[in-house]
Amino acid sequence: MESRKRAGVVILGLVVLALGIAFVTAWSSGKGHPDSATSPDEPAASAAQGGGASATASSGGKGGGRTSGASRSGDSSRPREVLAELGWGTGDSQLGRERPQEGNPEAPMSLAVSPLGDVVVLDQVNGRLVKLSPDGKVTGTTPLTQQTPQDVAVAKDGTVVVLDRLRDKTVAIIDPYTGALKGDLPVQGEGIPNPGGITGTFVDGDSVYVEREHGALIRIGDLSGKVDTTRPEIPGRPTRDGRAYILARIIDGPSGRLFLNVVDRQSGQHRYTREYRLQFPLMFITLLDSDRAGIIYLAVAGELPTGKASPATEHAVRLFCVDPLDGKVIGQADLPLNTLPEETFRDFTVLDEGGILYQYRTESGVSLRRADCR
């Protein structure tokens, strides 16, 4: 009975999501220029040099927004805290980098933060996880058995899950205390005919999910290693406050348009679909997640204006903090974009207490940095 109820909620959420996307597409095609004004009741979250966001929304119901935080300008002057600097190599306090003559160059693929603030970096070149304390000191490494691990996530109890979508085609479950392998969950099956289309792995409670092409998430099992043969879907990434599912997509990259869709988790009802009109061209979404309070963090890479005579633009990342109730932007910050050739899977992650951690690569190594947009 419970499974049928859950399936009904998911189906309802997906239907509402489809209607929300259709609304955004139809609304956008009839409104003219993508940099047109915001909705009447909301000022634009304008940034310095005209690079901010204007937004319109279709709401599934009323909901009071956050009133204490005003939108901020593109705040490139805000200090960035460096948590750790790790050089390239194979030592305990180093991370692997590979630049083969044939094949893709690689650097650490992903990172995650535990509820206690420990940082886990997926150092797949050296075949291990590297763990750092909340103050940035390396505290240990854990060897990996997978052939091509690409993503990592940490559960509330500290259990680590690692995704290999290409060769092993599994999510490995690793004990947080011993580093032992607790089990492997196959990713290919119902809902995932092609594991190469998986765009992330996520943990919600004791459930392990994989994401299909930046859309729905499929439950493949639990943290004990038990496989879920029913493989139910949810209509987006679960927020850490347990209240919503979120999904974002770029509508039109050259004109700077993207949308955020939010579905209420308990009722399965559509909360809102909001379109953001950024006044610069978009390349891709680099982050979509939330903190423990439910604030949504949405980051996009694009050609941001510099405010200087030359060059007029630069490739960078703009990070937005978004109110979960109505989608209003409550703050933003500009961050550097990795431009070295190494392939990675996830460079940004959200901290439970708020703010983000990201890895920035240079020729000398990886800089782990904190930033915030609240």
Image (cartoon, rainbow, N blue to C red):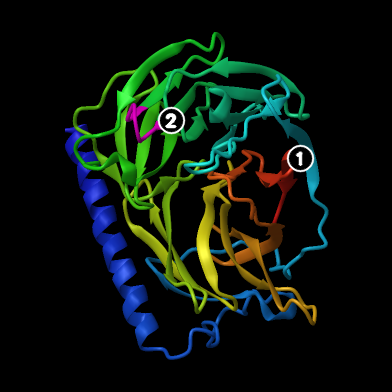
Left or right side of 14 for 204: right
Q: Quadrant of residue 59?
A: bottom left
Q: Quadrant of residue 126?
A: top right
x then y, percent, for residue 96: 63, 30
Left or right side of 10 for 304: right
Query: What residue did someone put label 2 on?
Result: 148
Residue placed furthest toward the front: 101
Query: What residue did someone put label 1 on?
Result: 364
Three-letter amino acid code of the residue under disc 1: Ser
How far is mark 2 from mark 1, CA to CA?
24 Å
Left or right side of 340 for 30: left
Q: Secondary structure at mark 2?
A: loop
Q: Is residue 341 above or below residue 334?
A: above
19 part of magenta stretch: no
Left or right side of 330 for 217: left
**Number of numbered discs present?**
2
Q: Which residues are magenta?
A: 164-170
> What residue is at 56 percent from the left and 61 percent from the top?
300
* Neighbourhood count class around disc 1 (C-alpha, 10 Å): few under 14, some 14–19, many 20 upward: few
> What residue is at 55 percent from the left and 81 percent from the top?
41
Q: Secondary structure at mark 1?
A: loop
Residue 204 visible from this viewpoint? yes
* Residue 300 vs residue 68, the one in the foreground: 300
